[in-house]
């Protein structure tokens, strides 16, 4: 397998950009609520397709390195920007505000993408690769919609969130009160517009190279920037996460847990894994939340596990 490395990330940018421009088909999927941005690439010798469900704030541009890498390894790749982020439609006048009405809006979008785009261009075996919030969306979709996925690989899945200095119960009360007062579109306390904090203060990755490219990409493309979450997003998220224990995904799951994660609560990952007999969970030491954008010594073993998982569920 080919693995993209931090040391060669700068020198590989030309090849990545050529791939993005010449080999990646990009377009919009029309929905009653707005347009969803998506892209796909299918190498000639592809045997398996990978459908990517990204995390909150993320979108196609952030995943260029990974998509290129998967393509070089003969995987067909499909990716969609979730509503409210990336190049997909935004709900509110202030486009920095993270908002969604209901979580099933996300999973319904994923179903439409799978039916109208993925299935149109790919009829072979496929697996899902999901990160953080995208993992919650993937679980909801796979449990509720008819599909033909062979397995799902979950990177630092958001099955519960940290409420930092405020205990969970008071947080839920504040969010419920705010929504009852009609403050759905207001930023939650401590949230604001996009703010690129320095690498030394970030909680996402310990790879300075990948973090720098991520921030440079968002600086060059202001229209894909996204800020903090609203009370509406928190209300929808809390409501969904309360129901996640009732969902059953009847296909193999691999849960990659970041041992040093301070964004999501890892205990919920182990709880979900225990409820699924066909689930595997592995912790990656010293890893922060964004496993797919971590240092090579973390990211390479992660992707090795992903490739082995793909082989095991599609052979």
Image (cartoon, helix red, strand yellow):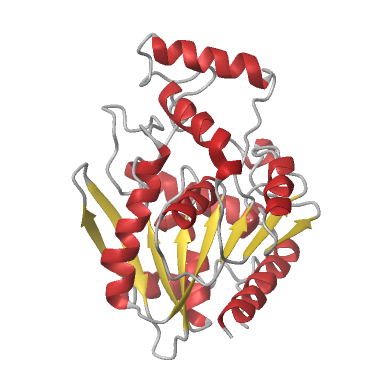
Q: Identify whether 118 is placed above or below 195.
A: below
Residue 295 lies in quadrant: bottom right
Camera sees residue 229: no
**How far across and down, in percent of the image, does residue 208 sit?**
65, 52
**How far across and down, in percent of the image, does residue 119 sit?**
32, 72
Q: Identify whether 103 is placed above or below 295.
A: above
Identify which residue, 132 or 125, lies in the foreground: 125
Residue 147 lies in quadrant: bottom left
Q: Is 39 positioned to the left or the right of 76 in the image?
A: left
Residue located farthest toward the bottom when viewing the structure as drawn: 45
Identify which residue, 280 or 224, lies in the foreground: 280
Q: Identify whether 151 is placed above or below 294.
A: below
**How far across and down, in percent of the image, does residue 122 sit?**
35, 78
Q: Residue at x 56, y 62 (%)?
A: 250
**How far across and down, in percent of the image, does residue 185 sit?**
35, 21
Q: Residue at x 54, y 19 (%)?
A: 190
How many marks the image carries: the answer is 0
Identify which residue, 65 or 131, lies in the foreground: 131
Residue 281 lies in quadrant: bottom right
Camera sees residue 58: yes
- Image quadrant where one finds the N terminus: bottom right
Q: Residue at x 62, y 13 (%)?
A: 170
Q: Residue at x 81, y 54 (%)?
A: 285
- Image quadrant where one finds the C terminus: bottom right
Q: Identify whether 5 is placed above or below 260.
A: below
């Amino acid at each position: 397998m080919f693995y993209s490395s931090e040391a060669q990330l700068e020198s590989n940018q030309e090849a990545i950009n050529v791939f993005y421009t010449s080999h990646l088909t990009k377009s919009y999927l029309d929905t009653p609520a707005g347009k969803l941005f998506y892209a796909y690439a299918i190498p000639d010798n592809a045997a398996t397709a990978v459908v990517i469900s990204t995390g909150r704030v993320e979108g196609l541009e952030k995943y260029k390195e990974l998509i290129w890498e998967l393509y070089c390894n003969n995987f067909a790749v499909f990716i969609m920007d979730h509503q409210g982020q990336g190049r997909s439609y935004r709900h509110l006048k202030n486009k920095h505000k993270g908002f969604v009405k209901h979580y099933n809006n996300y999973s319904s979008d994923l179903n439409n993408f799978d039916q109208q785009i993925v299935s149109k261009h790919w009829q072979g075996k496929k697996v899902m690769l999901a990160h953080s919030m995208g993992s919650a969306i993937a679980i909801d979709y796979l449990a509720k919609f008819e599909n033909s996925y062979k397995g799902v690989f979950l990177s630092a899945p958001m099955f519960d969130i940290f409420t930092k200095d405020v205990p969970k119960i008071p947080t839920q009360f504040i969010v419920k009160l705010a929504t009852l007062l009609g403050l759905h579109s207001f930023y939650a306390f401590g949230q604001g517009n996009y703010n690129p904090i320095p690498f030394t203060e970030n909680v996402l990755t310990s790879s300075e190279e990948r973090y720098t490219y991520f921030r440079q990409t968002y600086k060059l493309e202001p229209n894909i920037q996204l800020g903090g979450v609203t009370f509406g997003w928190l209300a929808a998220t809390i409501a969904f996460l309360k129901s996640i224990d009732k969902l059953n995904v009847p296909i193999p799951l691999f849960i990659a847990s970041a041992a040093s994660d301070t964004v999501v609560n890892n205990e919920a990952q182990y709880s979900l894994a225990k409820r699924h007999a066909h689930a595997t969970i592995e912790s990656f030491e010293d890893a922060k939340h964004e496993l797919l954008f971590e240092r090579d010594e973390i990211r390479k073993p992660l992707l090795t596990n992903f490739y082995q998982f793909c082989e095991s569920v599609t052979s």
